[in-house]
């Protein structure tokens, strides 16, 4: 059920927006050697956690506050856990002794915190960023393992028709955002060798900005940077 929910738009847009898919594949060439293979994998139904992990611990829980989550993490003992969900992590999970929750945020910390990180990065900094950090009580303020910025990601399809803003927004978070985070995680692993030995740097709360989800006008401005008006004709 979770897989069907999380990967609905990557799969649906792959079928309904083939020209947009090709534009994204072409534009992601600077970020990944095989963007088509990566995105096709997201859109497929063949992904299994057991293919990518030595051990998998299935847990049935009603949200992050369910005691079953805390018990499972506590039973693991000292561990670095990759947190890939959204929302606010309860303090009881952050306070577990020996447990560090690693998250990859689509923004260069501390300059770009908060929601719509990729869009805000492209709008205010002109290029995407991503950071791997350990979760703390406040939003995107935890110790940073790695923060990096990438070449600007611009997507064009001269022969195509420009989809509406809602479709472009969904495409960003179906295809572009996941690849950006995956690349940042790979860079983190390469730099640290072993995440258990990572020595992150503390953030200064007074530095940087925390952004909210964009309103319609701001989102359009950001999407026009990512998908230039002169490269995709309006329907």
Image (cartoon, helix red, strand yellow):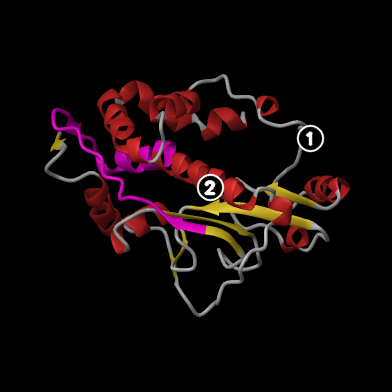
Say which element carries label 1: loop
Q: Which mark is residue 187?
A: 2
Point 41% across, 36% down: residue: 32
Q: Earlier in the sequence, mark 1 or mark 2?
A: 1
**On screen, residue 101 above or below 42:** below
Point 46% across, 57% down: residue: 148
Report whether 77 appears left or right of 122. Answer: right
Residue 99 inside the magenta-drawn segment: no
Report whether 119 appears left or right of 138. Answer: left
Report whether 180 appears left or right of 135. Answer: left
The C terminus, quarter of image: top left
Residue 112 appears in the picture as rendered: yes
Q: Residues within 10 Å of mark 2 (few under 14, many from 20)?
A: some
Q: CA distance from mark 1 to mark 2?
A: 26 Å
Q: Position of residue 147 (x, y in %)?
A: 50, 59
Q: Position of residue 28 (x, y in %)?
A: 34, 37
Say which element carries label 2: helix
Q: In this figure, which residue is indicated by the disc labeled 1?
A: 57
Magenta segment: 147-175
The N terminus, quarter of image: top right
**On screen, residue 148 above or below 207:** above
Please tell me whether mark 1 or mark 2 is closer to you in this view.
2
Q: Which mark is residue 154?
A: none
Q: Position of residue 194 (x, y in %)?
A: 69, 48
Point 46% across, 29% down: residue: 38
């Amino acid at each position: 059920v979770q897989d069907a929910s999380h990967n609905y738009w990557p799969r649906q847009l792959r079928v309904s927006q083939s020209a947009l898919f090709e534009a994204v594949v072409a534009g992601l060439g600077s970020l990944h050697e095989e963007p088509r293979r990566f995105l096709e994998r997201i859109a497929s139904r063949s992904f299994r956690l057991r293919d990518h992990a030595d051990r998998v611990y299935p847990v049935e829980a009603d949200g992050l506050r369910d005691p079953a989550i805390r018990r499972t993490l506590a039973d693991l003992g000292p561990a670095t856990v990759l947190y890939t969900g959204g929302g606010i992590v309860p303090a009881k999970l952050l306070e577990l002794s020996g447990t560090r929750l690693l998250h990859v945020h689509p923004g260069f910390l501390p300059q770009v915190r908060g929601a719509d990180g990729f869009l805000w990065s492209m709008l205010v900094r002109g290029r995407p960023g991503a950071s791997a950090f350990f979760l703390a009580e406040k939003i995107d303020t935890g110790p940073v393992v790695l923060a990096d910025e990438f070449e600007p990601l611009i997507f064009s399809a001269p022969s195509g028709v420009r989809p509406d803003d809602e479709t472009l927004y969904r495409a960003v978070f179906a295809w572009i955002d996941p690849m950006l985070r995956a690349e940042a995680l790979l860079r983190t692993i390469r730099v640290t060798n072993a995440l258990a030995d990572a020595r992150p740097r503390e953030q200064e709360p007074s530095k940087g900005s925390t952004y909210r989800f964009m309103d319609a006008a701001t989102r359009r401005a950001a999407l026009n940077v990512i998908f230039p008006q002169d490269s995709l004709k309006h329907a």
